[in-house]
Image (cartoon, rainbow, N blue to C red):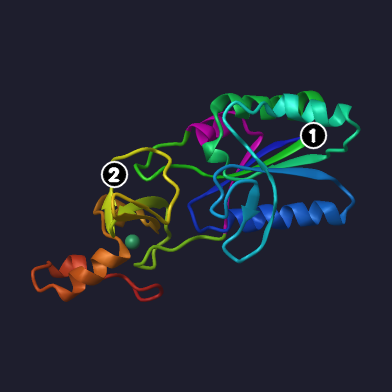
């Protein structure tokens, strides 16, 4: 039975690395797959991981129809045993429905990888639809850590080093907008709620005005 699987996690939890590993494992067994991604940090039509590995991929543009794409490829004589879809949080809800059709009607496995929630802690549309439709949702075990050492469960966006909770849902990181560097950082929920990034915690630790309970950060294994 083919499956629609959603591997979810925060940023920095190794999703793209796992996507590449999974493609490698299936290929090693003689299976053939097609890789899709959207807004990868390395640019269009590339799936890259922070560990430095990368491979060619099909860029998922607005309006791309997965079911149509796969049927067309199969009709042209291509072999497709599975799809790997990275950055699936950026997919449209309708595209996730098409992926479910690929699984059910064409008996092709679809492995999707994505961040669950955005920098405002709201579900991305693609992730929401995957949670609704997937046969399985796997929360990745390679866990990212907050600067305090706690498990990082939330994505923060920073503008000029300061955490923000308003703005467009999708802004690719490491770009400069209006002279401000846009960045992302994973935090535990506590520090996401307090809007304390590693930079502001360092500044806070140096400032005599900060209350001590904000400056003291639990160190792993030393609670
Ligand atoms: Zn924290």
Q: Position of residue 174 (x, y in %)?
A: 42, 56
Q: Which mark is residue 87?
A: none
Which region of the structure is painted magenta? 125-141
Which residue is situated farthest in the left direction here? 209
- Whether residue 126 is in magenta: the answer is yes
In the figure, 199 relative to 176: above or below? Answer: below
Q: Which mark is residue 165?
A: 2
Label 1 CB sits under 8 Å from any ligand 1 atom: no
Q: Nearer the viewer, residue 187 or 135?
A: 187
Q: Nearer the viewer, residue 199 or 133?
A: 199
Q: Secondary structure at mark 1?
A: loop
Q: Which residue is mark 1?
A: 108
Residue 210's quadrant in the figure?
bottom left
- The quarter of the rendered structure image containing the N terminus is top right
Foreground mark, 1 or 2? 2
Q: Residue at x 81, y 51 (%)?
A: 26
Q: Residue at x 31, y 66 (%)?
A: 198
- For label 1, the crowd category at 10 Å Cα-Cα, with few meaning under 14, some 14 to 19 and many 20 or more, is many
Label 2 CB sits under 8 Å from any ligand 1 atom: no
Contact (CB < 8 A) between labels 1 and 2?
no
Residue 85's quadrant in the figure?
top right
Q: Position of residue 27 (x, y in %)?
A: 83, 53
Task: Work out whether mark 1 precedes mark 2 in sequence or the reverse, and give the earlier one.
Answer: 1
């Amino acid at each position: 039975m083919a499956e629609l699987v959603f591997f979810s996690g925060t940023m920095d939890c190794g999703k793209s690395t796992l996507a590449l590993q999974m493609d490698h494992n299936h290929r090693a067994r003689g299976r053939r797959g097609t890789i899709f991604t959207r807004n990868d940090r390395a640019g269009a039509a590339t799936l890259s991981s922070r560990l430095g590995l990368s491979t060619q991929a099909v860029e998922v543009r607005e309006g791309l129809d997965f079911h149509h794409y796969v049927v067309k490829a199969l009709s042209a004589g291509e072999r497709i045993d599975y799809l790997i879809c990275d950055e699936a949080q950026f997919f449209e809800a309708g595209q996730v429905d098409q992926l479910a059709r690929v699984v059910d009607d064409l008996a092709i496995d679809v492995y999707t990888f994505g961040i669950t929630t955005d920098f405002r802690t709201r579900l991305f549309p693609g992730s929401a639809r995957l949670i609704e439709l997937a046969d399985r949702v796997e929360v990745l075990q390679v866990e990212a850590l907050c600067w305090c050492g706690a498990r990082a469960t939330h994505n923060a966006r920073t503008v000029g080093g300061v955490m923000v909770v308003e703005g467009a849902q999708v802004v690719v990181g490491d770009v400069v907008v209006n002279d401000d560097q846009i960045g992302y950082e994973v935090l535990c929920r506590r520090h996401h709620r307090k809007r304390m990034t590693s930079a502001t915690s360092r500044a806070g630790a140096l400032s005599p005005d900060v209350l001590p309970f904000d400056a003291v950060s639990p160190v792993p294994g030393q609670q």
